């Protein structure tokens, strides 16, 4: 009997703490979003974060997209050649890249690069009293640190995904033409026939949401970190892990919403 | 006792302030008056609640109960906008400087002025030079980043940032911690100069007795969240209070027991 009660109590405690964290995160997100709308606006912080998130992530995202596009062309050829359906490859590559791989891979790369950096930077500011110092200098830390990062994430990731879309298709194209003997014009025509505006748009909507989630996790865990170097370290880890999991979960939900029949 | 009809309210008046973290009472009914223009030193060991007291007045923490008045106005009861305004009159020197490491020194120093739009970015660089000179630094230091400065220079820049907006109230959190004794004395001297020049009211928390006597007019001792003594800073070394005596002379035996376990 005692064991059962103990189990119930433990489950209850875990559930309560989960609900509490979810609530705290939701409040943090709402506060951050509301500060995006209200002045003063910190343009310099926004520009710096935007460059860091968007521009400096370009090489990583570009290489990831290029290789992924190529590998899909290669793998689907192996499968489809058995049924003499090689002509479907261009379509498979462009749909896979625009709908899923572009947003997801760019998101994961940015989570590792930028989400971690945000958590580490804001976390260090927390444990060295810099966030308290902002408050004493008539500056709201949520407005100064969090709002510009959320906005930068939401805008930068769709732009990165556009680049990833183009390069992913280019990767598939290169492999198909150079290695598998496709005709360049036929491949491009097949690509254009397969892709619809909807595919790209939903991919970009996903990207905006992922950008928001990545920045939110980086800011949230950094902002609430405590306990010196170790605290900042675990904040950084949590930010990347949680952002990556949420990103994949939301990816599924959005795909289910838009593309499932 | 007749307080006199004409007495102005103290600059800072604290009444029955309580704050707990879980089971631990950090502030246990603190009442304190700091008259206008006074430098008030709060001494006490680590974990005695000194920092929490400052953080409650600054609004970085909310006390569980009690009242904090600045110029007779209840800060905790005031609407958010007014509270921010009252608190913008407090300058704070943090223990380890808490300088913004992503910004050059000049932007650190003028950060509060820029935030309040009292300055444009174009004139901020020059203004920073003037303020840096007040704390004994060359204006050219403004172009460096905080990580390029020594501990003593960081404290000076922190002080420059705290006094930049010419606040009515200045807080100092362990101003000499981490400095050698000579640099400690130099920083104390700067603090006294700045407070005098601005005519500010100051609260410093410290466990450095030499520093407490250099900075303070009045002093109080905090132990386990309670004020155990209050008097003139000059009498710290011969207060006749067992707690203060043990603390100031660094004795192992006495009423203060070190809690090594939580």
Image: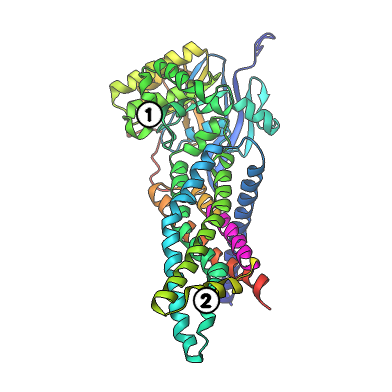
Residue A120, above or below A111: above
Q: Do marks 2 and 1 share a chain?
A: no
Residue A221, above or below A94: above
Whether residue A94 is visible to the viewer of this picture, yes or no, is yes
Decide whether residue A201 is among the magenta residues.
yes
The span shown in magenta is: A198-215
Q: Which chain contains the residue that carries disc 1?
A: B
Give the residue at x 64% y 16%: B9
Decide whether residue B94 is among the magenta residues.
no
Residue A13, above or below B164: below
Q: Dividing the picture into quarters, in which one does residue B129 lie?
A: top left
Quadrant (top left, top right, bottom left, bottom right) of the C terminus of chain A: bottom right
Q: Which chain contains the residue that carries disc 2?
A: A
Give the residue at x 33% y 26%: B152
Q: Nearer the viewer, mark 2 or mark 1?
A: 2
**Label 1: few (<14), some (14–19) or many (≥20) C-alpha neighbours in 10 Å:** many
Disc 2 designates what residue? A186
Q: Dividing the picture into quarters, in which one does residue A176 lie?
A: bottom left
Whether residue B238 is visible to the viewer of this picture, yes or no, is no
Q: Position of residue A89 (x, y in %)?
A: 51, 79
User: Going by the image, does B55 lie left or right of A232?
Assistant: right
Disc 1 designates what residue? B247
Q: Position of residue A207 (x, y in %)?
A: 57, 60
Q: Which mark is residue B108?
A: none
Q: Main secondary structure of the magenta part?
A: helix
Quadrant (top left, top right, bottom left, bottom right) of the N terminus of chain A: bottom right
Q: What is the secondary structure assignment of the residue under circle 1?
A: helix
Instruction: Give A232 or A69, whichever is nearer the viewer.
Output: A69
Q: What is the secondary structure assignment of the residue under circle 2?
A: helix
**Label 2: few (<14), some (14–19) or many (≥20) C-alpha neighbours in 10 Å:** few
């Amino acid at each position: 009997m005692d064991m059962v009660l103990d189990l119930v109590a433990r489950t209850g405690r875990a559930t309560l703490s989960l609900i509490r964290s979810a609530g705290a995160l939701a409040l943090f997100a709402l506060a951050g979003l509301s500060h995006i709308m209200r002045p003063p606006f910190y343009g310099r912080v926004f520009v710096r974060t935007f460059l860091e998130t968007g521009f400096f992530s370009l090489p990583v995202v570009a290489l990831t997209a290029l290789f992924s596009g190529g590998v899909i062309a290669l793998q689907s050829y192996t499968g489809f050649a058995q049924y003499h359906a090689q002509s479907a490859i261009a379509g498979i590559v462009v749909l896979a890249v625009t709908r899923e791989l572009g947003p997801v891979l760019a998101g994961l790369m940015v989570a590792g690069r930028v989400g971690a950096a945000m958590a580490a930077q804001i976390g260090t500011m927390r444990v060295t009293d810099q966030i308290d110092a902002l408050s004493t200098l008539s500056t709201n830390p949520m407005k100064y640190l969090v709002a510009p990062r959320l906005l930068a994430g939401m805008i930068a990731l769709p732009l990165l995904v556009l680049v990833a879309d183009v390069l992913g298709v280019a990767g598939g194209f290169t492999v198909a033409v150079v290695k598998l003997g496709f005709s360049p014009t036929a491949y491009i025509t097949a690509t254009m026939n397969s892709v619809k505006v909807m595919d790209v748009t939903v991919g970009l909507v996903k990207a905006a949401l992922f950008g928001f989630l990545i920045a939110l996790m980086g800011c949230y865990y950094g902002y609430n970190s405590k306990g010196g170097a170790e605290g900042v370290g675990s904040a950084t880890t949590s930010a990347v892990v949680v952002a990556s999991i949420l990103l994949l979960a939301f990816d599924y939900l959005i795909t289910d919403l838009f593309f499932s029949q | 006792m007749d307080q006199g009809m004409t007495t102005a309210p103290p600059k800072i008046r604290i009444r029955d302030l309580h704050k707990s973290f879980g089971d631990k009472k950090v502030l246990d009914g603190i009442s304190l008056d700091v008259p206008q223009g006074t430098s008030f030193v709060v001494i006490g060991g680590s974990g005695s609640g000194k920092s929490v007291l400052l953080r409650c007045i600054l609004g970085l923490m909310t006390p569980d109960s009690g009242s904090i008045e600045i110029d007779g106005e209840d800060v905790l009861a005031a609407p958010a906008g007014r509270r921010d305004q009252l608190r913008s009159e407090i300058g704070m020197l943090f223990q380890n400087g808490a300088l913004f490491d992503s910004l050059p020194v000049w932007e650190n120093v003028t950060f509060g002025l820029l935030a309040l739009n009292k300055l444009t970015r174009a004139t901020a660089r020059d203004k920073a030079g003037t303020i840096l000179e007040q704390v004994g630094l060359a204006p050219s230091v403004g172009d460096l980043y905080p990580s390029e400065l020594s501990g003593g220079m960081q404290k000076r820049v922190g002080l420059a940032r705290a006094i930049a907006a010419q606040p009515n109230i200045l807080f100092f959190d362990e101003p000499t911690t981490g400095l050698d004794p000579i640099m400690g004395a130099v920083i104390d001297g700067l603090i006294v100069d700045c407070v005098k020049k601005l005519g500010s009211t100051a609260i410093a928390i410290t466990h450095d007795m030499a520093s407490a006597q250099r900075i303070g007019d009045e002093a109080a001792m905090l132990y386990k969240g309670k004020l155990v003594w209050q008097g003139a800073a000059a009498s710290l070394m011969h207060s006749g209070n067992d707690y203060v005596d043990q603390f100031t002379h660094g004795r192992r035996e006495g009423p203060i027991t070190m809690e090594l376990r939580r």
